[in-house]
Amino acid sequence: MKQLLLLISFITTQLLYSQSCPNITATDISGNTSVHLSCATGGCVELTTNVPKSYLTTSYQVASSTYAPVIPFDQGTPLNAKTDDTFSDIIPLPFNFYFYGSKYNKIVISTNGFLTFDTLQAGLASNPNILGSNPNSSLPQNSIFGIMQDLIFSDTDDSEIYYEVIGSSPCRKFVINFYKAKLAGCAETSSFQIVLSEFSNEIDVIVENKPFPCTTARFKESLIGIMNASGTEGVSPLGRNAEIWQSGNESWKFSPNGNQIQPSIFWRNSANQLVGSTATINACPSKSDVYTVTLNYTLCNTNYKFTDSIDVTYDQSGSAPVINTPVNFSYTVCDNNADNTETFDWSTLVKPLITTDPTMNVKFYQSLAAAEAGAGSGITDIHEGSYVVYARVTNPKGCYSVGIVNMNITFLDKIEAIDIKKILCFDGTEDVTIDLSTIYPEMLTTTISEISNVTFYTNLADATVPNIGTSIPAIQTIIDDVNLVTYVYYVRFENAAGCYTVKKITIELRNPQAVQDQDICDFENDGEETVLLSSLNNRIAGSQPVTLSYFQNASDANNNTNAITTFQLTNTNSPAVVYARLDMKAFNGDCYRVYPITLKLIPSPFLTKESITVNLGDICDNNNDDVETYDLTQHEKDIYAGTESFSFSYYLSYNASNNTLGNMISNPAGFSISKNTDVYVKVARGACFAIAKITINFDFLPTVTLKPGIISKCDKGYDYGETYDLNDAKSEMFPASQNSDLLADMDVTFYENQENANLGTSTISNFQTTNYNTVTFWARFQSKNTHCYSLHLLF
């Protein structure tokens, strides 16, 4: 049976089109959805489930996808988009959507082909001009561009913007259709849709048609992409980033690629007892049973639960398989890629030594304990030396035996080499010829005389096989006309024994570039700022492998004389120009570029309060772990009570002499406090910011100290069923000498899992019956005097 639950309620609409959800399926390791287990002396079976992948939205990747509009482009609730260059009113989303690490439930739509989560833009004008490539603080921030361009919607034709929600929770999609919008100044129209997906937080941009702008178009550039709230991070497909282009029937998918969200996994039997907490478990029932697996995903404050069950029928009519053990196996092979490991065909080469019965399932493990447990798929590789592996042989009834294999593996001479990267300087348009044969000798650790053959490839798969027909000559000419060109070539080294190693040569052609407009914050708002020019290095050159120096004029910069380190910028001379020289060391000869850098003095935000002191008094140290959580974000309205839109970030250290912050707090809404603490708040408008300080003072109340509880009881009559009173463990778990309260001052409750115990919800009876020899529960001791609590396991 399958069941899909969402632990929070959303408003939903009728399912109009088929939507797919990441269902889970409970099976045995062979993929069977039910199991018959038959062993005379007891037996086990591996149960497993697929685990849908979900990722944090701290970063993204974009890839082309199959063109498949979610709904027709003229379907949905009309926005009545008849006013040019405007943002819509606020439109509520039917579900929480996570974008660059933040949660949103409202959007605003621009008539120029994009949406923003910045709801302060509602009803305001929307600039039709694209002022830079993504990411750029001059672009609309916290936005999804799909396609951003200068568009006209009119009540004299059928052009319109529509929005609609389809599907059912938790796999709904919110669709924004831009239908037959004219390019400003042109007769041609463009239709496309933006799709926001629940749970996965994926973003699709689906383009039906996007023509070239006509010669009379006001603005010709168009943009597909996404950008964060500060304009510092953004992703766009190649060729779609503020460029002039045409397209039709194309789709782009923006997928979160932050850290993978690991769900909590719970396997329970029909008595609702926890029997496992990993995707694959080894179930050893003593009777027929039903096993239910639950995957619980937590995305910020939203919980998703996926559930499935499998029936295991048990009888005692079978027996363990008979196998050959121990067996000896000797083998000589290349150590390709010199990594002391080789993929090995255990089934073909070793399994026949142990059993020739084709119905047997054989897996190999590094330890006897692992083979007995039978978890996972076993080992797939070999390494050099004499060592023992263990073969778990399982018959169709689920009964198994474990055999010993004495391995004697010899590796032939290996080839040792390293990857290498070469940077070449060029002007962005010239053709560059390289000779790979002059580079590869630097890669070898092994003596070059031991190498019998060297070939070059453009991908790892062809080099590994090898696919000789796809090999390339050593002389390569690169003709790409962009400022950064990266090519990767794979070198296959072979020796006389036929062993090989594959390593890569990375070629970078670079024409050093500079971001020439620099906003300088007036931190004191006094009309002047001494600019330490080296502090602009990263902003001007980013991660380019260059050395920067600064000069008053272009002549000094070209001659590399009279360099300067600081510049006094004032309201009087702003904007001012200095010259940056970017020097780069390169394989084909060092080079440099000189750029004028415009410095513009920008006022910092004016704060309502620059210092806040929070006196919490006496607070609980729940769970006696010397830490509690505090929501720092609740003070944002106190720090700034105005109407401007600022971003807030939080740090534990601040150097006022150079305005640098350190130790960023990743989760300010759940900040862990363990002592009186100063927190520094960066309130930013683009690159300019002001600093506020939050001082938190508190003392911890007396803690509740616990230790584990164990209740042991004989299985009278060997009937696999005994009843326990969990209250019997209270006095053992509560060491009176370590607590300021008496046991009589405690409210003691019991729970199936730690999550419920922390929340104090879904209590269970103190009387529990089990037919398993070990079952765990959680006990919560809460003081009636202070209301502080602690939890501990009860076995």
Image (cartoon, helix red, strand yellow):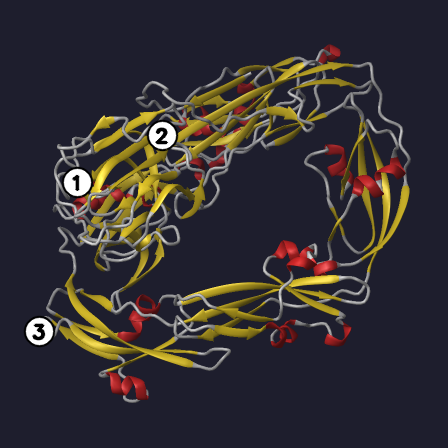
Residue to which mark 2 is pinned: 173
Say which of marks 1 and 3 sits in front: 1
Residue to which mark 3 is pinned: 572
Reply above or below: 649 against 288. Answer: below
Q: CA distance from mark 3 to mark 2?
A: 53 Å
Residue found at the very far left of the displayed protein? 572
Q: Are marks 1 and 2 in contact (CB under 8 Å)?
A: no
Amino acid type indicated by mark 2: Lys
Label 3 crowd (10 A; few <14 / some 14-19 / many >=20):
few
* Left or right placement of residue 224 versus residue 393 in this view: left
Label 1 crowd (10 A; few <14 / some 14-19 / many >=20):
many
> Callout 1: helix, strand or loop?
loop
Please report the residue visible at 42 percent of the width from the left and 75 percent of the height from the top: 426
Label 2 crowd (10 A; few <14 / some 14-19 / many >=20):
many
Residue to which mark 1 is pinned: 87
> Callout 3: helix, strand or loop?
loop
Label whose residue precedes the other's in the sequence (1 or 3)? 1
Reply above or below: 499 against 574. Answer: above
Label whose residue precedes the other's in the sequence (3 or 2)? 2
* Left or right placement of residue 589 versus residue 102 in this view: right
Foreground residue, 101 or 576?
576
* Left or right placement of residue 59 versus residue 105 in this view: right
Q: Is residue 630 visible?
A: no
Foreground residue, 138 or 783?
138
Amino acid type indicated by mark 3: Thr
Q: Write down the quadrant of residue 319 in the picture.
A: top right
Foreground residue, 451 or 295?
451
Amino acid type indicated by mark 1: Phe
Image location (x, y in percent) of residue 258? 44, 46
> Callout 2: helix, strand or loop?
strand
Foreground residue, 95 or 270?
95
Please report the residue visible at 31 percent of the width from the left and 26 percent of the height from the top: 165
